[in-house]
Amino acid sequence: MFHYLRGLLRKAQKSTVKRHVPNRPRCQPRLELLENRLAPSVSVVTNQLDYAPGATALFTASGFDSGASVQFKVVKTNVTPNVVETLWSVTDGGTNDQNSGAGTVGTKWYVNPAFSIGANFTLTATGRSGGVTQTATTTFTDGAASLDQAANGPPAAPLASSSWDNGN
């Protein structure tokens, strides 16, 4: 790639500089550095992939601007339509920030058994990074154990086929 660009540069010099004028410096090509246009990288993670009902989930969002306010949103995704369960903000370095690193925000969330048992969730963290609003997303579950079992009657009179029971 470099040799190709150098060849183009030589070709441009030959076509634009026909003759040398005394007491006038020759035009030298100028190269400019291009600005970095890569989007800043942000992320959000949970301390577990699956939580028990009544547990406390720990969330960490990183890559955001120092001092930025990061909005967290937990959405229950295994229902139609999806349900926003909780929405809150934490400021980097603020009193509710559970992480002391600049640009990294920590928070916690109660996995309420009233609506979370067996649920799938999407966690989103949105804030400023590099002066631009950025969003990071991850997923987690409250995959409580299913107590399904086959029942084929009492031992004294077993049935030929079984049926599924759910319960404790």
Image (cartoon, rainbow, N blue to C red):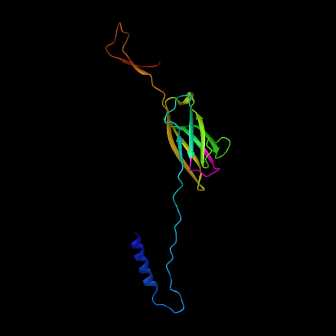
Question: In the image as oriented, which residue stretches furthest toward the left?
Answer: 160
Residue nearest the viewer, comparing 31 with 128: 31
User: Magenta region: which residues?
Assistant: 62-71
Task: Tell me residue 50's x, y (percent).
Answer: 49, 33
* Quadrant containing the N terminus in the rendered view: bottom left
Q: Visible in this render: residue 155?
A: yes
Q: In this view, does 147 lie to the left or right of 152?
A: right
Q: In this view, does 66 lie to the left or right of 39?
A: right
Q: In this view, does 40 lie to the left or right of 98?
A: left
Question: In the image as oriented, which residue stretches furthest toward the right?
Answer: 95
- Rendered residue at 55%/49% (across/down): 135
Residue nearest the viewer, comparing 53 with 65: 65
Magenta residues, dominant SS class? loop
Task: Tell me residue 9's x, y (percent).
Answer: 44, 77
Task: Tell me residue 43's x, y (percent).
Answer: 53, 47
In the image, residue 61 above or below residue 166: below
**Residue 147 falls inside the magenta stretch:** no
- Rendered residue at 40%/76% (across/down): 7
Task: Tell me residue 120's x, y (percent).
Answer: 49, 35
Say which quarter of the image contains residue 150: top left
Question: In the image as oriented, which residue stretches furthest toward the bottom?
Answer: 22
Say which quarter of the image contains residue 73: top right
Q: Visible in this render: residue 79?
A: no
Question: In the image as oriented, which residue stretches furthest toward the top?
Answer: 156
Give the number of callouts: 0
Residue nearest the viewer, comparing 75 with 43: 43
In the image, residue 90 above or below residue 55: below
